[in-house]
Amino acid sequence: MGIIEEELDFHINISERLKKITPEVIFLVIFAGFLLAFIAVYEGGVLKHDSPYQLIAGDMFTFQVFSEVAKDTNNYDFLPPYLAAGHTNAANMFSPTPGILVAEIALLSGAETHDILLHLNIVFLTLMIAGSYLALRYINKDLAPLGIPLGLLIWKWPFSYVINWGAQLSVVNFFFAVSLLLTFFFLKEKGMFIVFGIINAASFIAHGREFQTFNVAVILFFFIQWIADKFDLRKIDWHLAKNYLFSLAITVAVLFRYIPIWKDFAEGAKPASVVGTFFAYCPLSPDSYHYVSFAHLGIFKWLIIIGIIFALLLCFKKTYQHISLTFLMVYSLTYILSSYFCIYGNKTTQIRHFFPIFLIPILAICMYNLVILFNNNLKEKRGTIIIILAIILIIIATTFHYPKPVSEYPVSNPLTWEGIKWVERNTPEDSKVVVLYGDNFYQESLFYLMKRPFYNVLSEKYLEKIKQGRLTPTYNMTFSILGNHYVRESLFKLKRISYDGPNGANLKEFEGNLCNFDYVFSNKVSRNDIVSAYTQTVLKTLITESKFIPVFENDLMIVLQNKNVGGACFTEKKVTA
Amino acid sequence: MKQLVDELKKIGILFIVAYAFFQIHYYKESPFTIVRLLVAHFYLFIIPGYCLMLYYLKKIEFPYRVFIGVGLGYALQGILSFLITFLFKINLRSYYLFIPLIIIIIGVYLARKEIPH
């Protein structure tokens, strides 16, 4: 082949490849660009941080603790003693899947669990948007671009609550729910019930609440089919129903470990209260910090309301050729409905933070029907019009819902983290640690990461002592416990336990003496000069008048070791501010 | 076989797209860190899930099959890790790298009739 022919061939290949760049591909590239711009407010351009980064609420540290448990444990039966008031047989009932996924990615990638925690939330939320796109695309290619612009809102408060406040279990579960959505479309394929059953089981052990809602949606789907067919049972898709039932058998088989937990829950719950809470409307106070309503969707709320009307009409339309569309609508409507009814107290409404995910099909159906309504004569140009409309929706989302930057270290910071890691690496496992005072110590679950049983001095009572000018070794504190209140007696038998026992493991507030602990962990400085001076006096007095020695310190905090645990302590005295 | 080769190319493209996405997001991070992170996702979850879904090579289109496979991969790795530690009282560090390998072998074995020679 000559040079000219080679060049010609090259040009033909390029033009053939360019032809493959469809409007859909162009749209997806544009969407990915905007998605990256929205995500950019998280993680600060870095995967690996010196300490838990942008984790705002205590629950996030709880999730990190359980990722650490997954890395360390040889036995999922029991909680480590540092999470269970020193008990060695407290049953571990915490959802295991999210912790395991975080732990394994952290191990293989070489990052810390707190970094992977945030990373995985971002990955799963992105995958949820991708999955919702595919679910819509499976029904109609034109539907897909019209829904996903709503997904961008998930990165903005209050929806971003799910990213760094405390809904990691729900994020993992919701990712499985979106996977189940697509799996349901193919459930009639041979053996697909096994795939569905496995994902459904993983969903349950990630977070039971959304698992329940998804499966209610499946049951409602069959119920609606039955109503749409004028109560003719023969017209129900029994092949699909049978495969769903088979899948549930797989799910239950995987979940055998949770039988005692179900049993205990059933024994403890009164039927009337269960029914009452399930059907009770559960308004959340707008004053609540995590309040979410349709109003937060801005201009999209009107489109969603129109979409809900279209969705309801579609549900009851006899459209067997669009069985997937009916299911998609039932899925969205069930999640909306369930987010307004009490099932698990105020946690019920937490699901509303996922509005930008589970309302994607509703927005798509609204926009698509509006396009048809106003543009039915231009069928050949519909694809282009839809892409332009989708880009306009992205621009609206960007203009009105672009997220604000997130504070870098709202709870933890590299200096506090340095102290926590020092305690983990340098103290005996059964050491009792008392956490004295720090401006950033209001989320106590951060200190579970010391992996030592710890007592937490109550900040408000500590500040009272400062006001009273009392320099004292005794402070009001609680034993911090993260376990469920059960002790495993046998494989299928759990016993509820009380922590009000004589061993000092007491959830109730009590007055404890600093000299009874192995270590004191405290900040040396505070934003308030009086608090700084008082705390430094307490720490100095522990060193000079009791048997404490400093074993670790940095610019912010200090760890003191007690060389005479339970021995004589300094006597209370008056200090002047 | 050609279909499978084409699909493997697409998985490769998916890896490159994911790399580009995360390199932009983690722009201060070294390429090595990003590659290691992606290897974790692809090796532990995405490839095993994809291989298990090869059974549906001729029945389900590539994008839907891949997405279900991704969900299945994360689900199965999570469940198996939990069950192995729960039943045999061993730490996941000692076995978690072998689970994907076994899943990949099982997936390819189950799909052997679907992959034309």
Image (spheres, grey):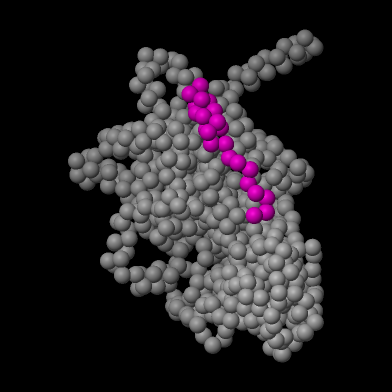
Please indicate, yes or no, whether residue A193 appears anywhere in the rendered image: no
Q: Nearer the viewer, residue A71 or A146?
A: A146
Residue placed most toward the observer, A322 or A416? A416
The residue lying at 54 percent from left, 77 percent from top is A509
The quarter in which the N terminus of chain A is drawn is top right
The extreme bottom residue here reads: A568
What residue is shown at x 19% (from left), y 41% (from top)? A230
Q: Which residues are magenta?
A: A388-410
In the displayed structure, B112 sits above or below A19; it is below
Counting every numbered tag in the picture gives 0
The spot of residue A238 in percent (x, y) is 30, 46
Q: Main secondary structure of the magenta part?
A: helix
Name the residue at the top extreme: A4
In the image, is residue A400 part of the stretch drawn in magenta?
yes
Residue A503 belongs to magenta span: no
Does the image show residue A516?
yes
Relative image position of residue A156 (x, y in whole percent): 55, 42
Q: Residue furthest front?
A: A576
Seen in the image, is A467 located left or right of residue B36? left
Is A296 situated left or right of A451 in this image?
Answer: left
Q: Nearer the viewer, residue A411 or B82?
A: A411
Residue A239 x %, y %: 33, 46
Q: Nearer the viewer, residue A211 or A149?
A: A149
Give left or right: position of A561 versus A242: right
Is the residue B81 above or below the residue A563 in the image?
above
Residue drawn at (58%, 61%), measured in percent from left and top?
A58
Q: Residue at x 52, y 42 (%)?
A: A154
Q: In the picture, residue A268 is in which quadrant?
A: bottom left
Residue A456 screen position, x and y as percent: 61, 73
The quadrant in which the C terminus of chain A is found is bottom right
